[in-house]
Image: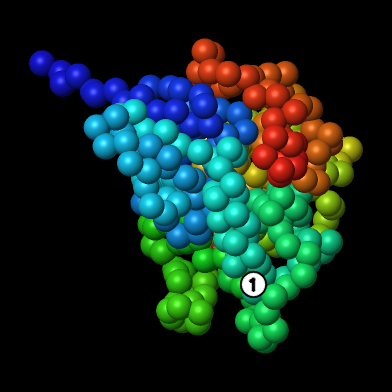
Amino acid sequence: MSEEVKKFKITIDGQTTEVDAGTTILEAARKIGGKSVPPAMCYYKPLETSGGRCRTCLVEVSKGSEADPRPMPKLVASCRTAVMDGMEVKNLTSEKAQTGRKAVTEFLLLNHPLDCPICDQAGECHLQDLGYQHGVENTRTEFERRTFEPEDIGPYIKLHMNRCILCARCVLTANQLTEEREHGILFRGDHAEISTYLNKALTNDFIGNVIDVCPVGALTDKTSRFASRVWFTKPMDAHCNCDKCSGKAVLWMKDDEIIRVTARKNQYDEVEDFICNECRFEKKDPKLWTIEGPRHIDRHSVISLNHYEKPKDYFRQIDNRDAKEISASDDNQHGEKILE
Ligand code: SF4
Ligand code: FES
């Protein structure tokens, strides 16, 4: 006899939904959808054990549960905290959570250069979005920044360690997707850095996916670096016959030229189907693809705003049709301008 899964009720920013016991607050927020979904720089649903490293997903738990309604004393990482029955959570409606996120953004930007004008990730970068939403104008520190020279870590990938926020997504991708991981986080604390093991280069068949999962511009595609700003290219859904992967990809095109090939991603910027190196790096001829049509880019970005087709139900809730609709005017309610 199959065991019935317990359902827990959770309210986030005044919107209530029911989720299976064991669901995290972040996933419950995604079920509700809309603007109450906390940002996530290290959590990545398709990768097991991701999350818990960056703290951008902090929320305030104003009621622990029906059984123990006391609030949690500190902000919690929503990607790693399980829902309790009757829990009440504040994200956009919490001044504390917004202040916490501001502090985390400042911390992530301590060593990160503000080189968006020359960074390939600009327009698709979660740190850039966070910087616009929560960044402070001036730095409060004067110590010397950690700097590294850009490094070739294989035939296809360039590492800009200066931009890395040590989210470990690329390490988990290599661990879980390829047969032999050839890179990792070396050293500890503020000496920690991403690097290849001695004399190794990232060549594995699926290693190109580390570029897609990197939330910043630390890992870039050598076949398309500096070829175009992303918002000047048109994303097209396309597929090809491939015996290594599903062959389903997005072609970023300028007229008839394929500037780069990426995997298809959902509105949380998570890859739906990981693609192989051959599809990503070698197939730059449109004749090799069947083009299905324009790709709907569901996630917002400070730079790509108005450049892609906006999904029709952008302001509607995703799964929970009974949930309250969040409108653009909610942006200003708590003193923070939330950019679309
Ligand atoms: S290189 Fe990118 S994906 Fe890898 S740890 Fe750094 S920020 Fe994360
Ligand atoms: S997304 Fe939760 S800690 Fe990074």
Q: Quadrant of residue 140?
A: bottom right
Residue found 10% across the figure and 16% down from its top:
1
Q: Quadrant of ligand 1?
A: bottom right
Quarter of the picture containing the C terminus is top right
Picture coordinates of residue 88 (x, y %)?
42, 33
Q: Specify whether residue 48 is in view.
A: no
Residue shown at 56% from the left, 43% from the top: 94
Q: Of all residues shown, which one is farthest toward the right?
A: 255
Q: Position of residue 148 (x, y in %)?
A: 65, 81
Q: Type of residue at label 1?
A: Leu
Asked if residue 9 shows in the view, the reply is: yes
Q: Residue at x 29, y 23 (%)?
A: 7
- Pinpoint residue 84: horizontal percent, then vertical percent: 31, 34
Query: For the residue labelled by badge 1, is the local secondary structure a helix, a strand or a loop?
Result: loop
Would you say 321 lies left or right of 309 here?
left
Q: Which residue is mark 1?
A: 110
Outermost residue to the left: 1
